[in-house]
Amino acid sequence: MSRATRRLILPGAIAAVIVALVLLAPVLPLDDVRGMDIPHRFAPPSAAHWLGQDEFGRDVLARLIWGGRASLFIAFGSALAAAVIGTTLGLLGGYFRGVVELLTVRAAEIILCLPPLLLALLVVTILGAGTWPLILALTILYTPNYARVVYAATQQVRGLDFVTAQRAMGTHPLVILIRTILPNVLPPLLVQASLVVASAMVIESGLSFLGLGVVPPTPSWGLMIRAARGAMEVAPLLLVWPSLALAGTILTFNLLCDRLQSALDPRSVTAGGALWLRPRARSASKPATRPAASEEAPLLEIEGLSIAVNDLELVRRVTLSVRPGETMALVGESGSGKTLTGLALTGLLPDTLRVTGGTALYTPREGAPIDLAQLDEEAFRALRGTEISMVFQDAAAALNPVLRIGDQVAEAIRVHHALDGAAMQARVVELLRHVGIPDPERRARAYPHELSGGQRQRAMIAVAIANNPRLLIADEPTTALDPTIQAQILQLFAQLKRDTPGMGMIFVTHDLAVVAEIADRVTVMYAGEVVEEGPVTEVFARPRHPYTAALIASVPEGGAERLVAIPGAVPSPHKMPSGCRFAPRCTHAKPVCTQSAPRRSHPSDTRLTRCFRWEEVT
Amino acid sequence: MLRYIALRSLVALFLVWVVVTVVFLLLHLIPGDPAELLLSTGNIAADPAAVAALREKMGLNEPLWQQYISHMAGVLSGDLGASFRDGASVIEQIALRLPRTLEVILAAALIATGIGVPLGTFAAIRADGKADAAISFFASAALSTPVFVVGSVVILIFAQQLKILPAGGFVDFSEDPVEHLKLLLLPAGTVALALLAVIIRMSRASVLEVLQRDYVRTARAKGLSRGPILRRHVVRNALIPVLTVLGLEMGTLIGGTVLVEFVFNWPGLSGYLVSAVDARDYPEVVGIVMTISVLFVFLNLVVDVVNALFDPRISLVTS
């Protein structure tokens, strides 16, 4: 039983008890709800009257249970009636659309133009007070809710293949609606029903309280509260009991609704917040064991880095290094773990993922190397932007839609440098001009949606380089763009590389044509592992891993097209092959490849491959 | 932007027309003779001759379409007719009472937003923790307790037992500002509690959603610390749906303060409506319902326009 289902038990059980109590009211040994006992009016709780006696000496407990019966009868009655009518309207409107939709769902929605209590009052004005006018009023009130929910669900279901198939076979629409669509819209309907019961009780009790609902002497919680108000000074408890009963019952049905919703639709529950906002639990950064940086030291040296979700390893013992001024391309198909590796270096992995092993030594401008695999949020924060910076794939989503471009760039500068208004403005404009945004003074005042895709990516790059980072991680920065724009953005990166000689870059991409253009060295990843690494020219001229070879072969001559698929697919992390992870797709695979995993081999000082047969393959 | 506002206004006008017509038809097509009702006292039937004379005077004998046209003409010229009961001008009564109702609602909205947004944001940051569970349960409980229960209980506590606030009533602000505000506190606080629950839930859900957005990750990648990320990127974006819901809720409240006004003896518009309903005073009922509906529709319009201002993308999408 899942947690969501377990959480249903408590409100479900309470609701069952409440419903059972009111259903059994006629057979329970209760006092007569109308039996007056004037001498004992306002008597406190006693053995005969557990909750005391009211202003006419009537038994409060009996009136509470019978009052609940009246309330629940009205609430359930109207919830059911509204469900039947609303579902019919929603099904018809959602299935047939067009005029039918106008006459059913849209017509019902007019009711939503009136405040709910007002509408109920109107109906009561016309029909007078009483149980049945209340049920009618509440039915009218809640019909559009059901109609909307069912309409939305029907529209979703009607597009599904199995419905289309039935239509094509000539099944009568009515049969499709009842047999196929109705069962599919039941879950949202159930949620809606518990919500309507709770909400109908609020309105019913309110109207009864005003004297416009249930007519005395029928007991009702609203009426009991109304009467108790007059006797507040003498018997304050008389106000407390019906208030508790009413609020408690409504709360029960509301909780039931909430938990029903999360049990039926687990997706509706957003994953719990954001760990980076919480106070620290992790230990502070350990000083790195490595000796102080020498001239030849790499900017970044990753050794055996692993990333996992729960116990599932997504990135396994990745090794990678970037020297100052060098551009390292990180290449692989979707799911190879290249983006995760990039995110791990800035501490921006999603909450569910963790670095489970390895080191990532980064040499900052000053001081000893830092192990990025050990840092906490605060320590990462000091590095972000000024030491390590990131350009994200989808600039439209990565820029805040409600802030002006200039403000978003200025914000990045302000984190690390205090500049006054004019100087800041000048710096922002200079940066925007530097990344090739035309008319930067004006564009600085634009919102992201007012820029073209290419300009947005340029703005994103301006944010990333605002503090002259020493390591720039670009995560597929050209993937979401048109080919011509892609070329321009690539030129911009090439220009940045020339202008800032010391800056190292990790260029995450799946596009080998891009690699050839921008990178000095390339690291090829497959299914969470590094399979080959080396200088770009050498790797392209003579790949040492069948996967790299297949990738290169799949690039059309001279084109900047996407990778043409290699037969088969990247294995899912749940079903990793036991031997070489590429073996199932490899044309060179031999029995040895499926028996054990290949270790790293070094064909030369600058090259690395993870293949048993690299010598024969190439 | 202007085109967007114009379009939304047209839709709003149409909705108002629909509501006015529906209310008119409802009241006139349903059996029950207001003239007879007005003249009968208790269970004694009214004199038929007097009823006929009154029907004539009230224009109830004219064909329905003529009544409708004269009604609409009145509405357009700002004349909502005179009360059946005492002949008082309905529009004047509304003008007198509406501000009092709006005062309670606005005060409640301020209290609820001021407390609800920070609480909801905090619950989202601590999602699934103990603080979140406590805040969420409080919101559920507040949402489940009808206003008249809250109102009655706060009177019991603050007026009856602690004796620190008056139980109800109304004093004009110009007469005694301090007393006016003291009297406002309990009704506004009562309305605020229900509103608070909605705002807490909405802020929590909205913040949780925004936290998953790419631009929050970008803000972190810039090296921003928690405070500025929450303020500038998370809450600012999360507020948009919260304000929408607040606007819609306030619209609902304009007709929904009936119970609060009744409980605290606050002479606002809704209480006026209840007595009008009780007396079947058609001009009053139609006038009040219309006012409330117009405000309701207008508020929805304002919400949409404010949203468009807050979120620069909206105007582009629709125009």
Image: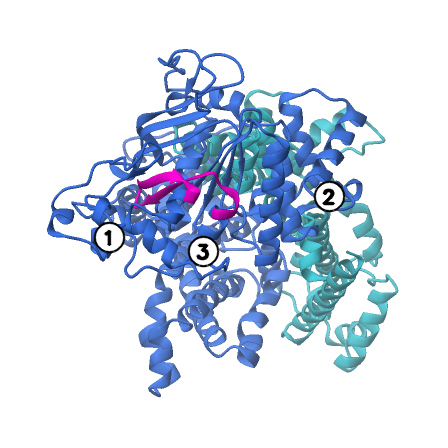
Chain colours: A blue, B cyan
Of badges 1 and 3, nearer the viewer stands 3
1 or 3: tag closer to the N-terminus: 1
Residue B23 in the image, given as x and y percentages of width and height: 68, 67
Quadrant of the rendered image containing residue A553: bottom left
Q: Is mark 2 on a helix, strand or loop?
A: helix
Q: Does residue A446 sit above or below A556 in this rendering?
A: above
Q: Is there any visible trace of residue B126 in the rendered image?
A: no
User: Disc 2 to disc 1, how far (Cα)?
Assistant: 49 Å
**Looking at the picture, which amino acid does disc 1 mark?**
Val
Q: Mark 2 lies on which chain?
A: B
Report which residue position mark 2 lands on.
Answer: B102
Residue A532 among those drawn in magenta: yes
Magenta segment boundaries in residue numbering? A516-537
* Quadrant of the drawing holding the N terminus of chain B: bottom right
User: Disc 2 to disc 3, how far (Cα)?
Assistant: 28 Å
Quadrant of the rendered image containing residue B164: top right
Q: Which residue lies furthest to the right in this view?
A: B77
Q: Is mark 1 on a helix, strand or loop?
A: loop
Q: Is mark 3 on a helix, strand or loop?
A: helix
Report which residue position mark 3 lands on.
Answer: A196
Residue B296 in the image, given as x and y percentages of width and height: 69, 55
Q: Does residue A510 sit above or below B85 in this rendering?
A: above
Q: Choose between B36 and B281: the one closer to the eye.
A: B281
User: Disc 1 to disc 3, how far (Cα)?
Assistant: 28 Å
Same chain for the residues under marks 1 and 3 in the image: yes
Q: Choose between A616 and B171: the one closer to the eye.
A: A616
Report which residue position mark 1 lands on.
Answer: A27
Q: How crowded is mark 3: few (under 14 residues within 10 Å), some or many (20 or more)?
A: many
